Image (tube, rainbow, N blue to C red):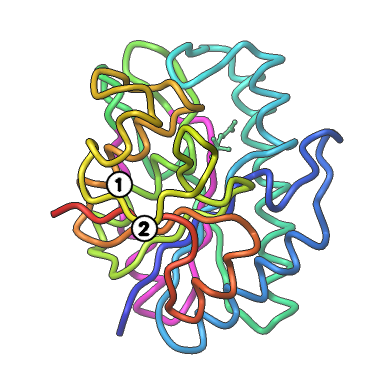
Amino acid sequence: MSLVVLKLGGSVVTDKDELETIDKDGLAAAADAVATLAESGQVVVVHGAGSFGHPHAADHDVSSDTGTHDEIGVRAIHDAMKRLNDAVLDALAERGVSALPVHPLSAGARETDGSLSLSLAATETMLAEGFVPVLHGDVIAHAGEGATIVSGDDLVVSLASGLDADRVGLCSTVPGVLDTDGAVIPEITAFADAADALGGSESTDVTGGMAAKVRKLLALGAPAHVFGPDGLSAFVAGESPGTVIRGE
Ligand code: IP8
């Protein structure tokens, strides 16, 4: 059975300008897409933080490389993400999708060099039992730092490689990887294809992290599609909306 890992960006399922507010239309469209995917194969969903996790992370001065040992702050960020995760699970349940949460805070950790180690046991067993696991960007224990932020994108890379996914989808508010004229680059098979747009081959994080993201996605065995909300139904139909990133 084919396995799809789908990331729903925080800006797709939440209203980024209003604290802890769901974007109802965005979430409904995303949940419809997951329901369709789940009819024909296995799906793992990962969602971002949007107006749930990010404001709390900023309040407590926590980022992917600045950690905290303050458990109150860690819990504030994690609890906000659990509230968003509940809303995503509810939207899926309304569509008859048997979805269950997997909270990265309790399923993984970062090593001192920042690399992520995520246990796949819960996710794999849920899939085998017919559930749709739903993970999310989170706070996570980080050796030497206390706890730091793990983004949904990092989770997607770990899940797609660890579970040997067949396809990966990253749905955010950008319609794909954009070239310097703002046009969507249809296919990237090597970093050089997008180096100009991403700020050159030495760059790791210039366009909102897109360069680093493209590098990680090129290293996957599965094609990764980067698209906007308008591309969701095409992705579900097996088409290639936005940019496909396919390492060779
Ligand atoms: O929205 C960030 O996840 P992202 C997670 O996927 C938190 O970058 C808790 C801010």
Q: Position of residue 224 (x, y in %)?
A: 35, 57
Q: Who comes first in sequence, dot 1 or dot 2?
A: 1
Between residue 225 and residue 136, name the one nearer to us: 225
Looking at the picture, does residue 84 appear above or below residue 127? above
Q: Residue at x 27, y 41 (%)?
A: 193
Q: Position of residue 78 (x, y in %)?
A: 62, 35
Q: Which mark is residue 244?
A: 2
Check disc 1 and report the residue beneath it. 217
Q: Position of residue 7 (x, y in %)?
A: 50, 55
Looking at the picture, does residue 93 appear above or below residue 55? below
Q: Is residue 136 magenta?
A: yes
Q: Residue at x 59, y 24 (%)?
A: 74
Give the side of residue 173 with respect to residue 104, left or right. right
Q: Is residue 198 magenta?
A: no
Q: Residue at x 51, y 12 (%)?
A: 69
Please state which amino acid type lies under the numbered disc 1. Answer: Leu
Point out the stretch of residues depicted in magenta: 116-140
Q: Quadrant of ligand 1?
A: top right
Element assignment for label 2: strand
Give the side of residue 106 with respect to residue 30, left or right. left
Between residue 145 and residue 215, name the one nearer to us: 215
Q: Is mark 1 in CB contact (under 8 Å) with mark 2?
A: no
